[in-house]
Image: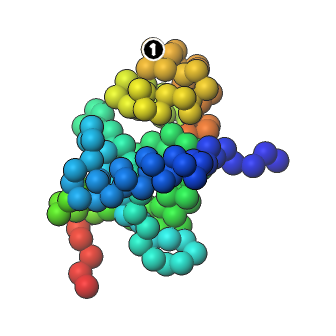
Amino acid sequence: MNAPHYNRPGRLETLLMTRPVTWLAHRGLAPFGAGALAVRGRKSGLVRVTAVNPLSHGGDRYLVAARGQTEWVRNLRAADGEGELRHGRRVEPFTAAELPDPEKPAVLRAYLARWGWEVGRFFDGATATSDDAELLRAAARHPVFRLSPRAPRRA
């Protein structure tokens, strides 16, 4: 069996891009509408925060894992889909439902139209103008989650 697809960022990319964008997103200053995803770690139990590119499409909000089976994807699954999107002081608690592959092409097309300039290299040639068959091939490598608002937890 093949290992799950994960395009892990290199140390330099993490140091120069991922960490600064996460820091900015967490403070509500992220460029281009990026947000900070906060989700409980599946091993440590600690809240982990990373930058994500949320997508609004068809009246719903989505998170797409451009790099594949990332740590945040694994943590979100282990947390039964519960997490938060943070934009500075604004916190949006949500429950995420993972989409099956046949439902992904329209979302991937919209995601690539919005964020392709940044993440397109992870989609093996699929673009916002690709046909459904090509996007369906890419779908198996890229988890997609539909977000539903939930009430904040009380301390």
- Asked if 136 appears above or below 130 in the picture, the reply is below
User: What x and y, as percent, mark residue 77?
Assistant: 52, 61
Dot 1: element: loop
Dot 1 alpha-carbon crowd within 10 angstroms: few under 14, some 14 to 19, many 20 or more: few
Q: Is residue 66 above or below residue 111?
A: below
> How many numbered circles are shown?
1
11 vs 21, left or right, is right
The residue drawn where x is 78% and y is 45% is 2
Q: Nearer the viewer, residue 29 or 55?
A: 29
Residue 63 in percent (x, y) is at 40, 46
Label 1 sits on residue: 129
How far from the left and from the top, in percent, is residue 95? 36, 60
- Quadrant of the image occupied by residue 7: top right
Residue 18 as seen in the image, left or right of residue 92: right
Q: In the image, what residue type sits under mark 1?
A: Thr
Colour scheme of the picture? rainbow
Question: Would you identify the image quadrant in which residue 142 lies?
Answer: top right
Q: Is residue 96 visible?
A: no
Residue 115 position (above or below residue 146): above
Camera-side residue of 87 and 24:
24
Residue 27: x percent and y percent? 23, 59
Residue lying at 51% horizontally and 64% vertically, measured from the top left: 75
Which image quarter: residue 112? top left
22 lies left or right of 66: left
Name the residue: 48% across, 53% down.
15
Residue 154 visible in the displayed image: yes
Residue closest to the far bottom = 155
In this view, the residue farthest toward the left is 89
Viewer-nearest residue: 73 or 87: 87
Residue ID at (43%, 67%): 48
Q: Point out the image quarter for the C terminus.
A: bottom left
